[in-house]
Image (spheres, rainbow, N blue to C red):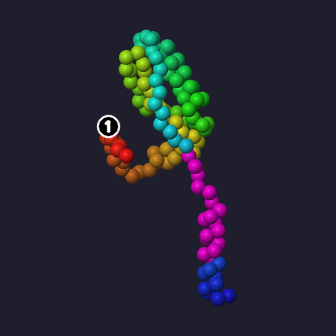
Amino acid sequence: MHRSFRVFLVALAALAALTSVSPASAFVVEVTTSVAIADRDDTAAVETAIKSAVDEVVSEAIAFTPTLIVLTHARMVGDRLWLRLLIADKAGEQAFGELDEDDAPVAPIPERTELKI
């Protein structure tokens, strides 16, 4: 067998292997929602309201089955509690786990950012 033909066969096999692998997809979303809180001193009512808001987001706004839900921010404005949720599926959760394992230094995230499109 000629050397160039062997190189061609190896390259063809490598190309076939690369094209047969499908990329993994992961779903990760950040959602902001709010819920009315009548009495912010009633811990049980606040907890129930938060759970209800999370359930509503998962059932009404997310089109995948989440395996990770993280409350990243909460703020009272008047009688409304605003919640920011990070939601991911299994592949997205694994991606976050891999990020945690990375030993590379992470630059601090600024408190406020502005994006203009």
Q: Is residue 51 above or below residue 62?
A: above
**Dot 1: element:** loop
Which residue: 37% across, 20% down? 77
Q: Quadrant of the N terminus?
A: bottom right
Q: Quadrant of residue 88?
A: top right
Q: Is residue 35 above or below residue 65?
A: above
Q: Residues within 10 Å of mark 1 (few under 14, many from 20)?
A: few
Which residue in the structure is indicated by mark 1? 111
Q: Is residue 5 above or below residue 46?
A: below
Of 102 and 83, the residue lying toward us: 83
Which residue: 60% across, 75% down? 11
Measured as percent of width and height from the top left, residue 73 is found at 41, 30
Q: Main secondary structure of the magenta part?
A: helix
Residue 11 falls within the magenta-colored stretch: yes
Measured as percent of width and height from the top left, residue 80 is found at 42, 19
Q: Is residue 81 above or below residue 88?
A: above
Kindly tell me whether residue 93 is visible in this rendering. Answer: no
Measured as percent of width and height from the top left, residue 85 is found at 47, 32
Q: Quadrant of residue 63?
A: top right
Single out the residue that lies furthest toward the front: 117
Q: Is residue 16 left or right of residue 30?
A: right
Which residue: 43% across, 11% down? 39
Of 112 and 92, the residue lying toward us: 112
Kindly tell me whether residue 65 is visible in this rendering. Answer: yes
Q: What residue type is disc 1 on?
A: Glu
Measured as percent of width and height from the top left, residue 51 is found at 53, 22
Q: Quadrant of residue 74?
A: top left
Residue 21 falls within the magenta-colored stretch: yes
Of 16 and 3, the residue lying toward us: 16
Single out the residue that lies furthest toward the bottom: 2
Which residue: 59% across, 52% down? 24
Range of magenta residues: 10-26
